[in-house]
Image: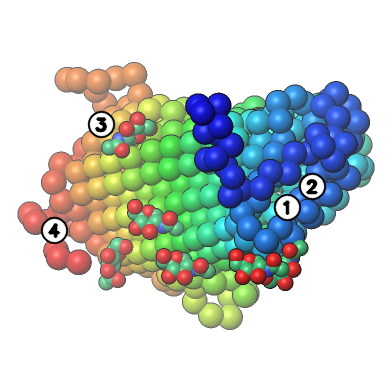
Amino acid sequence: MLCLLPFIADAHIKLFNVAEYGAIADGKEDNSVAFLKAWSDACKWNGSATVLIPKGTYMLKSVIFKGPCNDSITFQIKGVLKAPIDPSLLTDQKWINFRYIDQLNVNGGGTLDGQGSATRRKCKNNANCEILFTTMDFDFITNGHVQNLHSIDSKGGHFIVFGCENMTFTDLTLKSPEHNRNTDGIKIAQTNGINITSVKIGTGDDCVAMISGTKNAWISNVVCGPGHGISVGSLGKNDGETDVEDIVVKNCTFVGTSNGLRIKTWAAPLKKTLNASNFVYEDIVMNSVQNPIVIDQQYCPLHQCDLKEISHVQISNVTYRNIRGSSETDIAVNFNCSKDKPCQKITLDNINLWRYGVRGKGRPLLRNNCFKVEGASYGKQTPPSCIAHRATPLST
Ligand SMILES: *[C@@H]1O[C@H](CO)[C@@H](O)[C@H](O)[C@H]1NC(C)=O
Ligand SMILES: *[C@@H]1O[C@H](CO)[C@@H](O)[C@H](O)[C@H]1NC(C)=O
Ligand SMILES: *[C@@H]1O[C@H](CO)[C@@H](O)[C@H](O)[C@H]1NC(C)=O
Ligand SMILES: *[C@@H]1O[C@H](CO)[C@@H](O)[C@H](O)[C@H]1NC(C)=O
Ligand SMILES: *[C@@H]1O[C@H](CO)[C@@H](O)[C@H](O)[C@H]1NC(C)=O
Ligand SMILES: *[C@@H]1O[C@H](CO)[C@@H](O)[C@H](O)[C@H]1NC(C)=O
Ligand SMILES: *[C@@H]1O[C@H](CO)[C@@H](O)[C@H](O)[C@H]1NC(C)=O
């Protein structure tokens, strides 16, 4: 009887194995036709369906897995998916794209290999060669769960989440070489409800970037490094961007990153004020981070901005609580806010940051920088806060 158990357990889920649709695990031949056929059948199935990618290495060109489907659908990757090195086999800046699906699960313990380094080598002396393709792009997905996967050597970003609602990303490792620029870990826009938990990210850009229209994001147990930290923004460059609100970043660790917790906005003219508000950063460890806490409202990475412009993004109600660790530079907390829209309700509560490599008595104190910040600080403040210190927190 025992041998029947797995069959009984899965009896209500119909399996669509790509191998049965002609997929070949030789790591060379393109499998997009087989994958799309399996997807199409699974998506039409009147019940829970699973598209199974068994162990083995499958080459795959750009593919779009489109819904709506008839029921919940799982994309179970047990093997390795490999992107082509030649960028002409990819389209629309995406490698694997899921669109318009409710109750999508992507899991299986497998690996997405973007082959970004090989593509960058191939494109080195060719200005027309496009390299920035996202490994996996989620557009207009509701109630999605992405779990137990590895993404390595992405060409561009690892995951983009756009126009989604109620998403969870758990038990993932995302890894790209630090020198491969523009390889964001998880980039989020126009999305309401996203939880990112137990994720390890080492990459050549932001580990997590929350841009226009990110709401109700909960980020916890993330280890980031190398990379550019966990960021809100950049914001405020284009009209039509929408507010970023209600973000919690909790129990995260930064190791050797250029930034830790960063909010960045462009100094650019906007028709109306954009709001970035209600953020809590709590229980954060910085390990040799160049700029542990940053608000930069003159963000301009390529130094080609009009310095007379000012940011029209209003940053307010941001709390930093229990942040400790080491900085690679002399500035621990750098709040460089907008002359036009000073940062409001900024709270520093129990901050303990020291110069990397120097602990204990006699270590040089770091500095904080505050420009146009209104708020309060509580508890321990090392280095001394440049926001007014109060004895007890105000109730929020
Ligand atoms: C999908 O579900 C709809 C509504 O229940 C049904 O009419 C349709 O036949 C289903 N498609 C397939 C392929 O079963
Ligand atoms: C699809 O499933 C639903 C509920 O499980 C059922 O009521 C409906 O008749 C099914 N449709 C088809 C075409 O099988
Ligand atoms: C998202 O989750 C909330 C809370 O569980 C629920 O009310 C809402 O309907 C969900 N949204 C979608 C599109 O399913
Ligand atoms: C995210 O986690 C929080 C806290 O555990 C929970 O309240 C919220 O419903 C979760 N949201 C989603 C989209 O899973
Ligand atoms: C904090 O995150 C680490 C992983 O970075 C995890 O091992 C630990 O269990 C988390 N602690 C809590 C209280 O969630
Ligand atoms: C400030 O943000 C916290 C955490 O998101 C929230 O609970 C609180 O209501 C906000 N306060 C105001 C005045 O909006
Ligand atoms: C604050 O921003 C201005 C404008 O970009 C810049 O010149 C200045 O160096 C910044 N201050 C710090 C301490 O980073």
User: Decide: marks 1, 3 in contact (CB < 8 A)?
Assistant: no
Q: Residue at x 63, y 58 (%)?
A: 47
The answer to whether 359 appears left or right of 329 in the picture is: left
**Label 3 or label 4, whichever comes before in sequence order:** 3
Q: Badge 2 local density, few (<14 within 10 Å), some, or many (20+)? A: many
Q: Badge 3 local density, few (<14 within 10 Å), some, or many (20+)? A: some
Q: Which residue matches tag 2?
A: 38
Q: Which residue matches tag 4?
A: 393
Q: Badge 1 local density, few (<14 within 10 Å), some, or many (20+)? A: many
Q: Position of residue 277 (x, y in %)?
A: 38, 66
Mark toward the viewer: 3 or 2: 2
Q: CA distance from mark 1 to mark 2?
A: 6 Å
Task: Give the secondary structure at mark 1.
Answer: helix
The answer to whether 382 appears left or right of 90 in the picture is: left
Task: Give the secondary structure at mark 4.
Answer: loop
Q: Amino acid at mark 3?
A: Leu
Residue at the farthest left position: 391
**Label 4 or label 1, whichever comes before in sequence order:** 1
Task: Give the secondary structure at mark 3.
Answer: loop
Q: Which residue matches tag 3?
A: 365
Looking at the picture, does residue 72 appear above or below residue 325? below
Q: Badge 4 local density, few (<14 within 10 Å), some, or many (20+)? A: some
Looking at the picture, does residue 238 appear above or below residue 171? below
Q: Amino acid at mark 1?
A: Ala
Q: Quadrant of residue 82?
A: top right
- The image shows a total of numbered marks equal to 4
User: Decide: marks 1, 2 in contact (CB < 8 A)?
Assistant: yes
Residue nearest the viewer, comparing 191 with 284: 191
**Label 4 or label 2, whichever comes before in sequence order:** 2
Q: CA distance from mark 4 to mark 1?
A: 54 Å
Task: Give the secondary structure at mark 2.
Answer: helix
Q: Which residue matches tag 1?
A: 42
